[in-house]
Amino acid sequence: MTTRDTRLQAVAEFWFGPPPGGHRWVDAPRREGEDATSRWLVRRGRDTAGWMVNELELGQKELSELFLEFAQLEMTEEAILGFANCYGQIGVDAWIPEQGDGRAGERLSAWCSEIMAMRAAVDLSRAINERELSLLRSWIKFLPDGSLVFDRSHEGGWRSAWTIRRGHSPVAVFIDQKKWSRAGRLLLHEMANKRLAGRTRAGIVYEPRKDKLGFRIVVESLLAGMWMQLANCIALNRIGRCPVCGKLLVLTPGVSRSDRKTCSGACRSKLSRDSRAKKGEGLD
Ligand SMILES: [Zn+2]
């Protein structure tokens, strides 16, 4: 673990966790402009006080790689429910127009668009790190007016799109035709900052159990916490893949090529078998 990592974790701690009864999906009445009833993820039971206690009992967890799990989450009710029952709601939407008990909930479509956004940023960062020019070319467009567009389609008809317009973003002046990696970095700058804005803030917190003050980046939601970890990994070029099976992972900095991180013990031993075999070949 690098010094930079340690510092980030020391400064930005936050609490999260599922309610004791877990969650369930409910239908909410159709809203104006929507052509179907929307599906909402709500907590089971209404005892929010009980949930707060539970949240504190769960304590602080390190979220260093949770964003990867979220970015790869299937956009199904079942997969999302499973994630929410492990880690809690992510902090999108708020009140459902529902049956009078003022229940807090999160819309299925909001979860899906947040999954897409994180997946797009993770994949874009990885493509830059691994110099996958063909992928960058397929997602990024330079418009004649000097703007930069990211446009990617996902399964199920979902799309992630971002635009950096001249005059609207301080980084727009750095847009340079044909510089694909730089364009990708500028887009990541926009994606991450947009997701972090208003959801994180620096401040002094009072720690009642220690009767002390602490300086923290206060994280407003699980989603903001995951974006913070992702932003840190993006800035440190840490998003890569298992060299054996290709699974996404957070790379450990400063390791040699033969000593690269793998996703599992099985891939680890396959990698060392393969490199031993290679060495053997070299000796002949
Ligand atoms: Zn692997």
Image: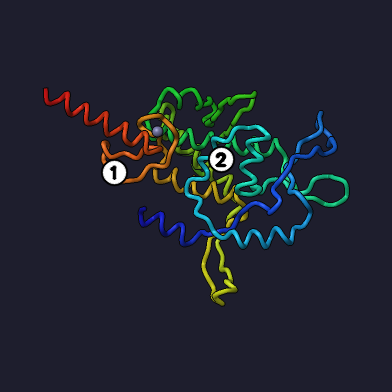
Label 1: few (<14), some (14–19) or many (≥20) C-alpha neighbours in 10 Å: few
- The image shows residue 75, relative to residue 90, as above or below, that is above
Badge 1 is on which residue?
A: 255
Query: Badge 2: how crowded within 10 Å, few (<14), some, or many (20+)?
Result: some
Residue projecting furthest to the left? 284
Residue 223, position in %: x, y?
60, 47
Nearer to us in this view, 202 or 7? 7
**Quadrant of residue 113 within the rendered picture:** top right
Kind of residue at disc 1: Val
At label 2, the amino acid type is Phe
> As displayed, is residue 114 above or below residue 226?
above
Count of picture labels: 2
Quarter that holds the C terminus:
top left
Residue 104 percent coordinates (x, y): 76, 50
Mark 1 lies within 8 Å of ligand 1 (Cβ measured): no
Q: Is residue 157 above or below residue 110?
A: above
Residue 36 relative to residue 4: left or right: right
For marks 1 and 2, the one nearer the N-term is 2
- Please name the residue shown 81% across and 30% down the image: 36
Label 1, label 2: how far apart the Cα atoms are: 26 Å
Residue at 18% over, 29% down: 279
Residue 93 position (above or below residue 177): below
Q: Residue furthest right?
A: 100
Q: Which residue is mark 2?
A: 70
Within the displayed image, which quadrant is ligand 1 positioned in? top left
Q: SS at mark 2?
A: helix
Look at 17% across and 27% down and name the residue there: 280
